[in-house]
Image (cartoon, grey):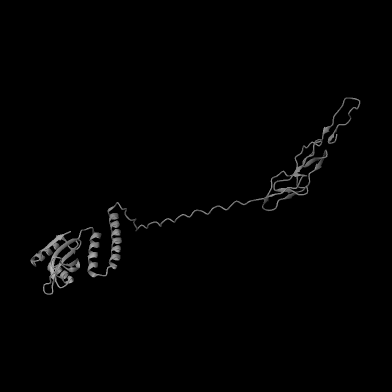
Amino acid sequence: PAGTSNADGGDDASGEDTACSATKCGVDEYVSSNACTACVDGSTKPEGDDASGDDTTCACAANERVESNTCVACDAGETNAAGNPVPGPDTACTKVVSPPPPPPPPIVAASPPPLLSSESPPPPPSSVEGMVANAEAKTEVAEVSRDALLADISDESTRAKAKLLADAAIAGVKVKKVAMALTAETGDVACAQAFLKMQLDASLGACDASVSTSRRRRLVTDTAYDVTVFVSPATVDETTLAAALESLAAEGVTATSTE
């Protein structure tokens, strides 16, 4: 039969039946109509196809495609698996999809420069130095707030009183109030007399004078005033305040001191 052979020959026609052997194709040969046929250029085939059997095909290598029964290299940027059959229908390569670029590295905040040997880190808040530094920082903030408040007060007397009260609050002390009754032409004069009779510098305190509710009659050109002098322990200590009260008593002025 087609695709077989009997290489030995010499079979005895009068004897028993004999058989032909299948023809085996060699390397880079395929079976076409029971005949071993060389593969076209570029295609390959292992040896061993049986010529007595069905037709077989050769194959293209990796990254090749079939075009008119010929192996053709894929274009740049394309790929194809090995094994496309030749002869056979035309095949196509596949474009290579580039992977997305990697994300940018995360932004890392720069570390602070190392301290020089002559520098030392700020003390922790739990240490004495840290507590002092913390208190000073709070005091500075309070003083800024105080100055902003005072800037909006136009009346000099009111501003002095507000400053004294704010300074005492910042220092953590309670303001002392010395109340007395005086007669004077005006409230400012009454306050000036109060500091004079106390033998106390007016810059060390603040004063508030209002017309006495119990003495509204005028004595010639004078008016009775209820005068309150405010002093802070931060600027006027107990000894100085006691001396001021004694001075008032020596002037015949009755005064009371409260916080």
Relative vertical location of residue 134 with respect to residue 36 in this rendering, above or below: below
Q: Residue at x 24, y 59 (%)?
A: 169
Q: Quadrant of residue 12?
A: top right
Quadrant for the N terminus, please: top right
Relative vertical location of residue 204 with respect to residue 99 in this rendering, above or below: below
Residue 47's spot in the image, x, y percent? 76, 39
In the image shown, does 123 or 196 lie closer to the viewer?
196
Q: Residue at x 9, y 65 (%)?
A: 249
Quadrant for the C terminus, please: bottom left
Q: Quadrant of residue 121?
A: bottom left
Q: Tell which residue pokes out farthest to the top in this image.
A: 15
In the image shown, does 145 or 222 lie closer to the viewer?
222
Q: Quadrant of residue 147?
A: bottom left
Relative vertical location of residue 249 with respect to residue 132 in this rendering, above or below: below
Residue 95 is left or right of residue 102, and the answer is: right
Residue 62 is left or right of residue 179, and the answer is: right
Q: Residue at x 20, y 68 (%)?
A: 203
